[in-house]
Amino acid sequence: MIHLKESKKGLTFDIQVTPHASRAEIVCVQDGAFKLKVTAPPVEGAANEACIKLLAGELGLKKSQMGISSGAKSRRKTVTVINITKKELELKIAGFLKANKIFEQKSFLENM
């Protein structure tokens, strides 16, 4: 499951991003974070914008509610969501995961 954290600025969770993919999609949950693919290149924040657009669309949130709070130039990023309760966001995430049959992918080391 996604690890949601509460902060003074809102709720946060991590994402792992692969830019320059052939299509934009949420692939799985790995190590408590969404694993995303976006078609945008990692140039001038294009991939970050694509991540926010994808997440907002899939989770039924407004893009204005979301932002990259850390890791803007990294593949591992932290997303902050505002104006929503933890329970509401948990329900949106759980609904998305169930509807799209996305499961947690175990890391390679855990399978050894």
Image (cartoon, grey):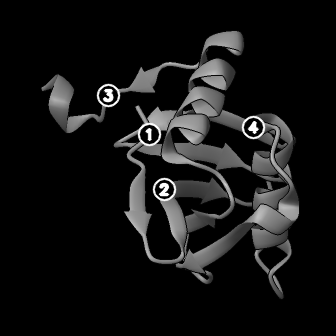
Element type at marker 1? loop
Q: Residue at the spot x=42%, y=49% of the render?
A: 4
Q: Which residue is mark 1?
A: 2
From what the image shows, is residue 101 above or below residue 47? Answer: above
Q: Residue at the spot x=68%, y=24% of the render?
A: 96
Q: Residue furthest bottom?
A: 44
Measured from the top left, where is residue 78 in percent x and y?
52, 67
From what the image shows, is residue 82 above or below residue 89? Answer: below
Count of numbered tags: 4
Q: Residue at the spot x=65%, y=19% of the render?
A: 95
In the rendered view, does 4 fall on the left or right side of 109?
A: right
Q: Which residue is mark 3?
A: 106
Camera-nearest residue between 102 and 63: 63
Q: Which residue is mark 2?
A: 13
Q: Which residue is mark 4?
A: 59
In the rendered view, does 39 fall on the left or right side of 83?
A: right
Do tag 1 and tag 2 residues touch (Cβ < 8 Å)?
Answer: yes
Element type at marker 4? helix
Which callout, 2 or 3, points at the residue further toward the start of the chain?
A: 2
